[in-house]
Image: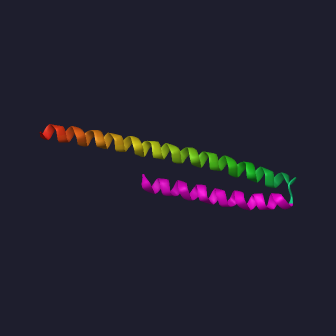
Amino acid sequence: SPRLLKQVDKQIRDTQNSLRDVNKLLKMDPGNADLLAQKQKYLTDAIDATKKKLEEEKSAFEQLKTDRRLMIQSASMKR
């Protein structure tokens, strides 16, 4: 649904912003294990959110294909 896609997009943006912040901090302290762990978590979150977005987009595409097929069938029955 469009609302779910918006939520996923927001989650991706938020994760990107968090990653940007952690990367800035890592430039000042590259060996910081806590920051590296945070970065790994944010990267995992970004991958998960991207997978979720792809699933939602695939689902929406399949629904569009089904709707189109039904419209074509309906139009051909009216002839």
Query: At which x and y percent is residue 59?
Result: 43, 43
Which of the 4 image quadrants contains residue 17?
bottom right
User: What is the basis of the colouring in this image?
Assistant: rainbow
Q: Does residue 2 lie above or below 79 as drawn? A: below
Q: Does residue 11 lie above or below 78 as drawn? A: below
Most frequent secondary structure within the magenta stretch: helix
Please give the range of residues in magenta: 1-28
> What is the number of callouts on the image?
0
Which of the 4 image quadrants contains residue 21?
bottom right
Query: Is 4 contained in the magenta span?
Result: yes
For residue 69, side relative to residue 19 (left or right): left
Q: In the image as oriented, which residue stretches furthest toward the left?
A: 79
For residue 15, side relative to residue 36 (left or right): left
Query: At which x and y percent is residue 48?
Result: 61, 46
Going 52% across and 48% down the picture, which residue do you hit? 53
Query: At which x and y percent is residue 33?
Result: 84, 51
Q: Does residue 3 lie above or below 74 as drawn? A: below
Query: At which x and y percent is residue 1?
Result: 42, 51
Q: Quadrant of the C terminus?
A: top left
Query: Is 18 contained in the magenta span?
Result: yes
Which of these two is toward me, 7 or 20?
A: 20
Going 52% across and 57% down the picture, which residue do you hit? 7
Going 37% across and 43% down the picture, which residue do you hit? 63
Going 65% across and 49% down the picture, which residue do you hit? 45
